[in-house]
């Protein structure tokens, strides 16, 4: 092709057709410019396609993280709801030993906690992706970042404060209650039953732990699930054109 155009140019020069030669040169320059513009356009399309594919992959990772999160939080909420009656029974001012013995969860009610730690693979990838200008203009990207920047600290605070409270109780029992070593083995003596049935301070501790779990921690979990479900709908809408 280059030899062909070169031959035309030489023929025009040899025949002293300056006007036609100039028109030809201008036309050749225009063709070169058009070729460069087309090449740039194709390159930009390829780059945009690569960025779109990368962001689609990131959204799929975020979606997977949130699905795992909502499943784990749902399990924890259901487990605590099933155990709520044990808390309420343990807080009663008057309760017989027979009633207490029927409650299988009651003796260990102040011994365990189920923390949640959100998956972060997706948000970590988004933070790396945000070095690109395109991400700053994406409303979904902004909503995902806002969710993690607001929810993670709230959830961490709920987990940290509840864990600290439980550790405080464990330390108190370990240092002041002779029945502690048997209690952790699931063995309970008369002193233990006297304490949990009659000591008002113990009942206050159960009430405090109940408040941390049911009025604070589970509330944060429910809000987190609601917000994640909203984001999952938006992510599904964004991914929909890619679904087959």
Image (cartoon, grey):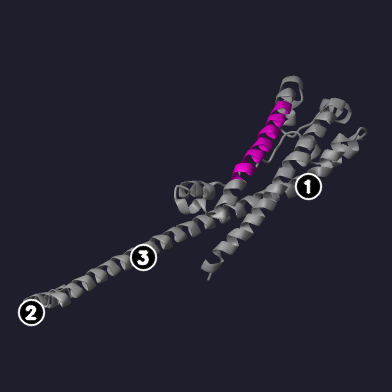
Which mark is on residue 41?
3
Q: Give the foreground label among 3 and 2.
A: 2
Q: Is residue 85 above or below residue 232?
A: above
In the depicted view, which residue is nearer to us: 192 or 166?
A: 166
Going by the picture, which residue comes out furthest to the left?
14
Q: Residue at x 9, y 78 (%)?
A: 11
**Mark nearer the N terminus (3 vs 2):** 2
Instruction: Assess whether residue 158 is covered by the magenta stretch.
Output: yes
Residue 234 visible in the shown view:
yes
**Residue 30 placement (x, y as % from top left):** 26, 70
Residue 109 visible in the shown view:
no
In the depicted view, which residue is nearer to us: 18 or 152?
A: 18
Residue at disc 3, secondary structure: helix
Which mark is on residue 81?
1
Query: How far is mark 3 from mark 2, CA to CA?
Result: 39 Å
Query: How far is mark 2 from mark 1, CA to CA?
Result: 97 Å
Q: Is residue 233 above or below residue 17?
A: above
Query: Quarter-wise, where is residue 105 in the image?
Result: top right
Q: Give the foreground label among 2 and 1.
A: 2
Residue behind mark 2: 15
**Residue 227 placement (x, y as % from top left):** 67, 51
Q: Residue at x 80, y 41 (%)?
A: 104
């Amino acid at each position: 092709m280059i030899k062909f155009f070169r031959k035309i140019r030489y023929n025009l020069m040899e025949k002293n057709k300056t006007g036609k030669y100039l028109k030809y040169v201008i036309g050749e320059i225009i063709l070169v410019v058009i070729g460069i513009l087309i090449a740039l356009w194709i390159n930009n399309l390829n780059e945009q396609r690569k960025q779109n594919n990368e962001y689609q992959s990131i959204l799929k990772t975020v979606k997977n993280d949130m699905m795992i999160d909502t499943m784990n939080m749902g399990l924890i909420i259901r487990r605590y709801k099933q155990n709520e009656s044990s808390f309420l029974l343990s807080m009663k001012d008057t309760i017989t030993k027979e009633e207490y013995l029927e409650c299988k969860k009651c003796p260990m009610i102040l011994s365990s906690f189920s923390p949640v730690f959100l998956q972060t693979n997706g948000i970590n990838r988004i933070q790396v992706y945000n070095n690109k200008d395109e991400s700053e203009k994406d409303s979904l990207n902004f909503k995902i970042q806002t969710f993690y920047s607001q929810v993670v600290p709230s959830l961490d605070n709920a987990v940290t404060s509840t864990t600290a409270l439980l550790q405080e109780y464990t330390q108190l029992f370990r240092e002041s209650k002779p029945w502690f070593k048997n209690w952790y083995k699931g063995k309970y003596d008369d002193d233990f039953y006297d304490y949990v049935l009659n000591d008002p301070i113990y009942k206050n501790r159960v009430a405090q732990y109940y408040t941390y779990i049911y009025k604070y921690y589970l509330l944060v979990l429910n809000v987190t699930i609601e917000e994640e479900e909203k984001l999952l709908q938006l992510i599904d809408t964004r991914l929909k054109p890619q679904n087959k």
